[in-house]
Image: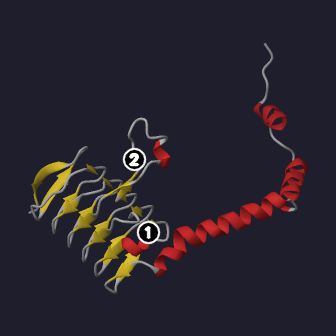
Amino acid sequence: MNKIEPSTLVKETQMSSKEKLFIVLKSIFSIHFFKAIASSFAYYIFEYVYWRFDIHTKGLYRVHISASIRNAHNVYLGYDARITTNCIVWAGKNSIIRIGDNALIGPGVQLHATNHGYALGQGPMTYQKRIEKDIILGNDVWVGGNSVITSGVTLADGIIVAAGSVVTKSFDEKNIIIGGVPAKKISNRL
């Protein structure tokens, strides 16, 4: 059995610099390149800039550039509310998301005030009527990273949501820690 040197395999499986240059030049001078640039620019404006004109705030707030906000005219941020990296805050056309004063929304958190319908026999789920319910987060609420809060949830002041939780029901007791899938009360804040 002949032993093949790794450098030989690399040369046989990789494109040459000349081939790579040809592909780059061919791509730049094509209509597809300009369509991709225009589409990416429009997406960037819609996803990261446009919502800032419509969102309701009490003054000081922080929203990371990577956060995705939909239907911003139905999103209300309290004083010094903070939404960090890679968060999804999707209000509906007829449902709101209200985040209280001094609330902390950790990285990767998802707030969905709307969802697809899922009735059998009513056509594909993506085209069914949306199910919309408000999400209300009280003051001084901390939602840990990668948690999901579904439509219709209200969280009282001072609640901490453990990282990775899925909150599907409301909690009206103040200053508690909740967590799990689905979330339940773990303890009181100390």
> Is disc 1 placed on a helix, strand or loop?
loop
Up the image or down, 74 lies above or below 35; here it is below
On residue 117, the disc is 2
Q: Residue furthest bottom?
A: 59
As measured in the structure, the alpha-carbon distance from the residue carrying label 2 to the one carrying label 1 is 18 Å
**Res 91 → quadrant:** bottom left
In the image, 168 versus 19, the foreground residue is: 168
Closest to the observer: 122 or 60? 122
Q: Residue at x 39, y 63 (%)?
A: 92
Locate the C terminus by quadrant.
bottom left
Circles 2, 1 touching at the beta carbon (< 8 Å): no
Q: Given the current orientation, which residue lies at the most extreme top position? A: 1
In the picture, the disc for residue 130 is none
Give the amino acid at mark 1: Asn
Q: Is residue 9 left or right of residue 131?
A: right
Residue wearing tag 1: 71
Give the structural element (helix, strand or loop) at label 2. Answer: loop
Q: Amino acid at mark 2?
A: Gly
* Residue at horizontal 48 percent and vertical 74 percent from the top: 51
Residue 89, image x and y in percent?
A: 39, 64
Q: Quadrant of residue 16?
A: top right
Tell me if residue 80 comes above or below residue 182 in the rendering: below
